[in-house]
Amino acid sequence: MNKIILDRRRLLGLGAVGASSLMLAGCDMFDGLGDRDSEARALLQKANDLTYRAQRLLIRDGALAPEYSESEIRQGQRPNGSTDPQSAEYLALKASHFSAYRLTITGLVEKPTSYSLAELRNMPSRTQITRHDCVEGWSCIAKWTGTPLSRILDEAKLKPSARYLVFHCFDAMDEGPSGPIRYYESCDLVDARHPQTILAYGLNSQPLPVANGAPIRVRVERALGYKQPKYVHAIEAVDSFSRFGRGKGGYWEDNGYDWYGGI
Ligand SMILES: Nc1nc2c(c(=O)[nH]1)N[C@H]1C(S)=C(S)[C@@H](COP(=O)(O)O)O[C@H]1N2
Ligand SMILES: [Mo]
């Protein structure tokens, strides 16, 4: 395992060198005319895709993120980002302990459907103790319980054209010209079907607190903290992200973070 991590780091390091030399090579493009700026962007995008493909090659599709023992849970899961959504819809659901909540599955699926929290809790569950790594430089080991996302996808039956899942959240991050800009995230179908990818409703043997994403937050255990959307109300199967936000696949991605966000 250590060897794999080392090799991966080394390869990612090489990837970074590759990307920065592309950037240098791209520099004189900024002095040129017309749409060369976007040419340079396309090059950088290619470097990003390369990193993604390198990671996909090195991390076997089914490889599990490390799991820990109860004794390694040292503190509660530190709430970060949104911790108390204020949208009217969310406040109403929270007031009734999420009894009227429904998780909607839409987009490129044969059977669009929705689930109440009770229905999700009554499905087969998975519990895992994993480490959450936030890009701000902190980590927490916590125990997550939830419904495997693969089970939900089997029921909804993805259409062959589906390539990604987009997770829509209740919380607003900013006010945009046409209303609130809500948190959203996405993942590919390999991560979506990964055995540790769950729709979590439990944290450290308690119901998931509001501060950590009640009633449902996604755990994609091989990815960074911002890839773990909280307050999820809809999952949409899509073939592209271009319709959402600035088209980069997530709120933080639209603000410059890497889409893949693997660890
Ligand atoms: N809806 C939503 N999901 C989110 C965020 C957020 O602000 N809103 N922040 C992300 C970030 S940066 C981190 S580190 C984790 C924090 O999860 P926690 O509050 O359970 O620790 O949630 C992620 N998912
Ligand atoms: Mo984070």
Image (cartoon, helix red, strand yellow):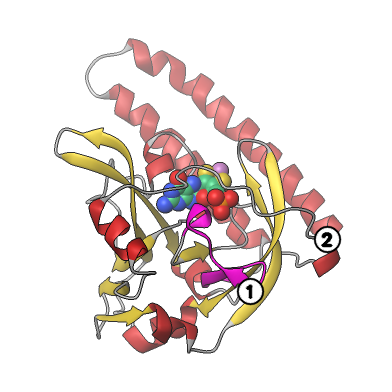
Is 47 rendered above or below residue 224? above
Q: Of residues 242 and 52, which is closer to you in this image? A: 242
Q: Is residue 217 left or right of residue 106?
A: right
Q: Can I make out residue 132 in this image?
A: yes
Residue at the (22%, 51%) spot, across then down: 243
Residue at the (63%, 74%) spot, across then down: 62
Q: Which element is circle 2 on?
A: helix
Please tell me whether residue 251 belongs to the stretch shown in magenta: no
Residue 104, percent from left and from top: 29, 73
Is 4 rendered above or below residue 26? below
Q: Quadrant of residue 178?
A: top left
Q: Which element is circle 1 on?
A: loop
Task: Identify residue type, mark 2.
Answer: Glu
Residue at the (48%, 89%) spot, across then down: 122
Residue 218, percent from left and from top: 49, 64
Looking at the image, the residue that sits furthest to the left is 178
Give the extent of the magenta segment.
197-213
- Counting residues from the start of the chain, the first of labels 2 and 1 encountered is 1
Q: Of residues 220 and 80, which is closer to you in this image? A: 80
Q: If the image is split into quadrants, where does the N terminus sit?
A: bottom right
Alpha carbon of mark 2 to alpha carbon of mark 1: how far?
24 Å
Mark 2 lies on residue:
72
Mark 1 lies on residue:
62
Q: Is residue 79 left or right of residue 35?
A: right
Residue 139, percent from left and from top: 70, 47
Question: Cβ of disc 2 within 8 Å of ligand 1?
Answer: no
Q: Of residues 63 and 113, which is closer to you in this image? A: 113
